[in-house]
Image: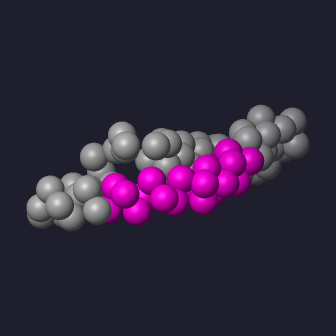
């Protein structure tokens, strides 16, 4: 199974890495479900940041920065979960 090296970089031995990869592969269905939830959150954040009402916010720039940070974090997490 191919996964990001970030999942296993903290393991010392090859055996530990392989054992973890096996457990991770067994969790693929759960990770896929969680990815769908995070994708919904990502799309909601995009919608909020592009909504016409957002431009009326007195702190629009801070709101946009927050939304962009949320979107970046969600993309990073989702990329880890693609096995």
The picture places residue 60, in percent across and down from the top left corner, at: 71, 45
**Residue 54 locus on image (x, y percent):** 80, 43
Residue 78 visible, this angle: yes
Magenta segment: does it hold 1?
no
Kindly tell me whether residue 65 is visible in this rendering.
no
The relative height of residue 37 versus residue 71 in the rendered view (above or below) is below
Q: Position of residue 64 (x, y in %)?
A: 65, 44
Side of 73 relative to 35 (left or right):
left
Q: Which residues are magenta?
A: 20-40
User: In this rendering, would 47 be left or right of 20?
Assistant: right
Magenta stretch: dominant secondary structure? helix
Which residue is at 83% across, 38% downward? 51
Splitting the image into 4 quarters, where does residue 33 fall? bottom right
Q: Nearer the viewer, residue 51 or 18?
A: 18
Q: Nearer the viewer, residue 78 or 68?
A: 78
Question: Which of the colour schemes (rainbow, by chain, secondary structure, one colour) is used?
Answer: one colour
Whether 26 is among the magenta residues is yes
Q: Nearer the viewer, residue 54 or 18?
A: 18
Left or right: residue 27 versus residue 19 is: right
Residue drawn where x is 49% and y is 42% of the image: 82
Q: Quick one: 9 or 67, which is closer to the camera?
A: 9
The number of numbered badges drawn on the structure is 0
Tell me which residue sits at (44%, 47%) in the image: 80
> Residue extending furthest left?
13
- Quadrant of the drawing holding the N terminus: top left
Residue 6 percent across, percent down from the top left: 30, 51
Task: Say which residue appears at 34% left-offset and 55% top-offset.
Answer: 21
């Amino acid at each position: 199974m191919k996964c990001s090296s970030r999942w296993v970089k903290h393991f010392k031995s090859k055996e530990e890495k392989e054992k973890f990869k096996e457990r991770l592969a067994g969790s693929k269905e759960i990770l896929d479900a969680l990815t769908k939830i995070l994708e919904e959150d990502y799309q909601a954040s995009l919608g909020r940041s592009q909504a016409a009402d957002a431009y009326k916010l007195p702190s629009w720039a801070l709101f946009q920065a927050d939304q962009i940070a949320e979107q970046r974090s969600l993309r990073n997490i989702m990329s880890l979960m693609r096995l």
